[in-house]
Amino acid sequence: MSVTLPFDEMVDGIGGVRPYWRALLASINELGAAELSERAARLALPGGVACDPVPLLLDRGTFADLERGLLERADLLDACLADVYGQRTLLAAGIIAPSLLFGSSGFVRMGQFGDEGGRLLRAFAVDLVRGPEGQWRVVAQKAARLDMIGTMVDARRQMEPAVGELFSSYDLERPGAAFENWGDDLRRACASSGRAPRLAVLSRPRGSGWREDDLTLARRLDALLVETRDLTVRDATLWLKTVRGLRPVDGLLSQADIALLDPMEFADGIGDGIAGLMEAARAGTVHLLNDPRAALIEMPWLGACTDGIARHVGIGTLRLPDIAQHLVIGDEDCIAPWGASRWFRAALDRRAVAVRAEAEPAGPCVAYPAPVFSTVPSVAAGSLEPRPFVLRMFVVHDGGDWRVLPGGVARTPDAGGFYDAPCRLLRDVWVEAEDATRIMGPADRQGVTQLAMRGEGDLPSRAADDLFWLGRYVEQFETGIRVVAMIGARLARARPSPRERAELDVLFAVLAAWYPRLVWPGEGAGMGLLRNALAPLFADDERPAQLLGRLRSLADDLRDRLSVELFDTIDEETRALRIEAARLGPDLREGREMALLAFCRHALRFCAMFAGLTSENMVRLGARQFLDLGRRIERGAGLCLLTGALGNTLVGGGAARWHDGARLAVELFDSTLTYRARYGVEIVPATALALLFGDEGNPRSLLFQARAIEATLWSLEGDMDPGASLAAEGRVLLDHVAALADPDVTPVLADLSPRLEAVRGELFALSRKIMRRYFVVLAPHSLDSFGDGDTSESEGGA
């Protein structure tokens, strides 16, 4: 029995290495298989997908053949869509069956659009395989979503630092110019008079695994990355919800499922989406890129018709034919005889539901013979072995003509799978560069001397809301950890002094204010009981771990707003801290105090890194302002909460007790060095309160937070009517805070806690007004929902 051998991309038919692979293979041999395998472990793409360090190489001749075939297919798809949504001569000629077209979810009955006669297709992806004879064939076409177009860029970005030696022998094509030209075309397509067009990329839902892909695409196109909840339709116009109100969106490049575009049209009015979007598209106020009608090219049955379509529209024989397939409409209705022993089948509507079938498939379906993939060398167990792949390439319209992005993504389907089977392994695709005289750069933007700066008014309310709470959660976390660190330092003493034992009682009372679920054994409890009381705090479902989880989740949602360094810091440090916390509890036995202190130091370093990176890596407007507002409000509220709790423990004590409390307060709010620099004497209540409440130069003081809040609100509001100004309320807060720093300390000490609680209430009231002013279109975050059933802001932990 003869065995069909797959086409090997690296080795020719007589066992020799193909010429354009030789330099790469020499570099791999120089590195060594073991070193290459070690470096491969560092490469990972979003969604748990591995990136193979060995690329797929396409020499200029191979890429030129693919390019000609893909440009020809772009003309074919343009002609097909224009006919199906126009004269429908393909139906009249019997090339496309009416039952297939009108019964297909890819055929969108949308009526007339405002830009009728314009281009339906502006970009698409094509999956290709190479058969044993060396012929490339089309497996699938994608238009509703351009999956992996961002991954193509990310894979190259990861590989260059990881395996830079492999790049040394090649001059490679890069897709940057094509992306720029494509972005310019998209903006021209949705240009409106009087202002620069606002282009947005609609991201897929959170948790889909594609957020990084969508983010890279948005950045390459210089577009806003938005979610469905960032958008609304009013008066047949698509609007972006921003901190400055509604802003019109002129062009929307959707990476979401078609059902998420408009549930009123595609999901029977049920589910998430942008209700009324199709109405806005018909009115011509927004351009959908691609047009939803272009989803027709994804239908599996279309591949069985492409040869006939090509002849009908005058193209003739396709350079890149579709894979062999058989269209089964009824029990006996097949386009071609079977002639194969094993088949895969797909529903007529969606290729994604392809399943294995051992016998002759039953209709209605599209049936495919079992695939024979070509292979490419892959790193496995310290050596190279051939693995199958499917090549995905992208074709975009740059305003003048179609262009094929140089490169792509080669994915290895899971074992035993069909062409579209899930995969856990991707690789970059390299294309040798053209001669310098033929390289095309981005089109010249004639007449453009200065690009318009995108204002802070384009900041979506959702992003501002997330930034606000990112700042608050960091401060919540730091506030609690500082108390825990002070407790840990005293628990670590071999023989704590009577003063330190008394301080532990005070600190546990303060910690209980931040963490109400703390079971405190009471004053005078033994060290073992205190350790046992502290241990549950580090469980995965308790407050520190939950705050770390929320920080990581918010950072993921804000990936397009954070620098790489800041995102990586939050992502890596929160993961590491949760692991450390899990190791601490539930058994915080004697001898583990040093591990507790190490955790606290790590946590405080993370908070310091966060503060430094946001200070140095974020522009002072827009996003930074809302993050800073959250931090200042939460830091002020935390100071009020913990200082008030500290004051409650001192009520009824003598002067010595108040002196001890003042020293703890200065240490608690990381102001010991500042105190020494200011006063250089023993810490006493009057100067301690002045430092913590009224010192404008102390970044930990309450007055510093109030002034920062007021200044930020004035900056946000500009020339707003003073009667509606939140900054004016910030001024009232500032006056109340200044009153706390009265030099006559005796009356202040007498009613310290109630006055602090009043200021804390003002801070939370101002926080709610900020949320109503800028985030009113969104459901607010819950400040505290750690199992006590209370989610109100004023009663939750600071």
Image (cartoon, rainbow, N blue to C red):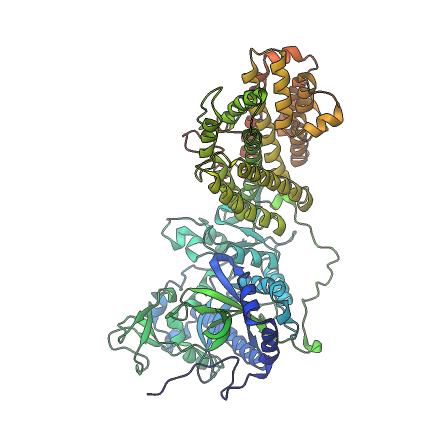
Q: Position of residue 186 (x, y in %)?
A: 59, 61
Quarter holding the N terminus is bottom left
Q: Position of residue 664 (x, y in %)?
A: 61, 23
Instruction: Decide if residue 215 is on the left or right side of residue 705.
Output: left
Q: Position of residue 577 (x, y in %)?
A: 53, 43
Q: Position of residue 242 (x, y in %)?
A: 57, 43
* Residue drawn at 54 percent across, 22 percent down: 501
Instruction: Decide if residue 671 is on the left or right side of residue 282.
Output: right
Residue 33, picture quadrant: bottom right
Total labels: the figure holds 0
Residue 790, picture quadrant: top left
Residue nearest the observer in this picture, 279 or 604: 604
Tell me if residue 321 comes above or below residue 500 in the rendering. below
* Residue drawn at 70 percent across, 63 percent down: 445
Residue nearest the observer in this picture, 744 or 92: 744
Residue 727, picture quadrant: top right
Residue 725 visible in the displayed image: no
Residue 442 visible in the displayed image: yes
Tell me if residue 508 comes above or below residue 135 in the rendering. above
